[in-house]
Image (cartoon, helix red, strand yellow):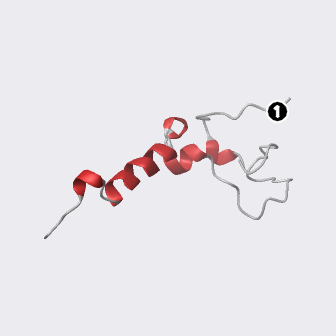
């Protein structure tokens, strides 16, 4: 059974989040590199799990190109 990924851990800086081992930042056993992988809450804030990147893409795509009613005819 896989470990449950915590949404907002108390001290995310103490753990490497790069694999399922969740090694201590001072003793990484997985060979993930010389630096630990940060938790998404450290990068995106405490509400990172509620963020929907597809909704953001849909919203920016709707504003990027004009629809049929938004065309500008200068003729």
Q: Is residue 29 visible?
A: yes
| Location of residue 75 in the rendering, given as x and y in whole percent from the top left corner | 13, 70
Bin the neighbour count of mark 1 within 10 Å (Cα to Cα): few under 14, some 14-19, many 20 and up. few
Q: Is residue 28 left or right of residue 36?
A: right
Question: What residue is at 58 percent from the left and 35 percent from the top?
Answer: 8
Q: Is residue 46 visible?
A: no
Label 1: element kind: loop
Question: What residue is at 79 percent from the left and 59 percent from the top?
Answer: 32
Q: Is residue 55 left or right of residue 23?
A: left
Q: Find the residue positioned furthest to the left.
A: 75
Q: Is residue 68 left or right of residue 52?
A: left
| Location of residue 42 in the rendering, given as x and y in whole percent from the top left corner | 55, 48
On screen, residue 39 above or below 64 = above
Q: Nearer the viewer, residue 69 or 29?
A: 69
Q: Find the residue positioned furthest to the bottom.
A: 75
The quarter of the image holding the N terminus is top right
Quadrant in which residue 6 is drawn: top right
Question: What residue is at 19 percent from the left and 63 percent from the top?
Answer: 72
Q: Nearer the viewer, residue 64 or 11?
A: 64
Question: What residue is at 68 percent from the left and 46 percent from the top?
Answer: 14
| Location of residue 18 in the rendering, given as x and y in whole percent from the top left corner | 73, 51
Q: Nearer the viewer, residue 32 or 62?
A: 62
Residue at numbered disc 1 = 2
Q: How many marks?
A: 1
């Amino acid at each position: 059974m896989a470990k449950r990924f915590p949404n907002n851990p108390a001290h995310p800086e103490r753990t490497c989040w790069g694999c399922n081992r969740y090694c201590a930042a001072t003793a990484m056993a997985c060979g993930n590199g010389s630096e630990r992988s940060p938790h998404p809450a450290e990068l995106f804030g405490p509400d990172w799990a509620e963020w929907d990147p597809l909704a953001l893409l849909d919203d920016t795509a709707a504003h990027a190109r004009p629809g049929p009613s938004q065309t500008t005819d200068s003729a």
